[in-house]
Amino acid sequence: MTQQHINWSEIEPENVYPGITRQVVHGERQTMVRYVYAPGSVFPEHRHPQEQITTILSGEIEFTIAGASRVFRPGDTGVIPGDTPHGARVVGDQTVETINSLSPRRETAPGP
């Protein structure tokens, strides 16, 4: 596979849930996802076989992972094991931006 350069501004955002958009980049063995959450938005609980590592770039968001809740702020990173139920909701009135790495590569994504 040859190296590629991709700028997030070149990827069309997909509406996932009300107030939540995502952009996706696939490599051979992993998937990278940029989520942008509007204030008040909620990503319902779901699970997937991939391990997920999420870094918060802006805003505050509460993740519930396997029934335990914690607020994440810019610079915080969470590791979610594969097949673990998790969901999120924006805390406060700021837009939240996250970068998520999923491995192995994800072929289907949560959402409607």
Image (tube, rainbow, N blue to C red):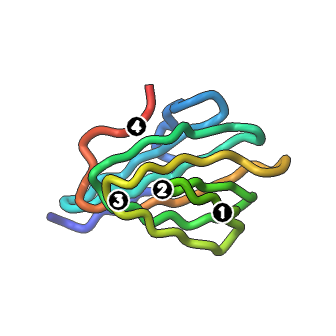
Foreground: 80 or 29? 80
Q: Position of residue 24 (x, y in %)?
A: 40, 47
| Residue 61 quadrant | bottom right
Q: Which mark is residue 70?
A: 1
Dot 3 falls on a residue whose secondary structure is strand
Q: Give the residue pinned by disc 2.
A: 66
Q: Which mark is residue 102?
A: 3
Q: What amino acid is labelled 2 in the image? A: Ala
Asked whether the residues under the numbered discs 4 and 3 touch, taking CB atoms below 8 Å apart as contact, a structural biologist would say no
Please tell me which residue is depicted at 54% across the width and 47% down the height of the picture: 87
Q: Spatial distance from mark 4 to mark 3, Cα to Cα?
A: 13 Å
Q: What amino acid is labelled 1 in the image? A: Arg
Q: Spatial distance from mark 4 to mark 2, Cα to Cα?
A: 17 Å
Q: Position of residue 63 (x, y in %)?
A: 60, 55
What residue occupies the far front of the structure in this picture? 67
Q: Position of residue 70 (x, y in %)?
A: 66, 63
Please tell me which residue is depicted at 70% across the width and 69% down the height of the picture: 74
Asked whether the residues under the numbered discs 2 and 1 touch, taking CB atoms below 8 Å apart as contact, a structural biologist would say no
Crowding at label 1, few (<14), some or many (≥20) Cα neighbours within 10 Å?
Answer: few
Horizontal relation, residue 40 to residue 62: left or right: right
Q: Which mark is residue 110?
A: 4
* Mark 4 or 1: the one toward you: 1
Q: Spatial distance from mark 2 to mark 1, Cα to Cα?
A: 11 Å
Q: What amino acid is labelled 3 in the image? A: Leu
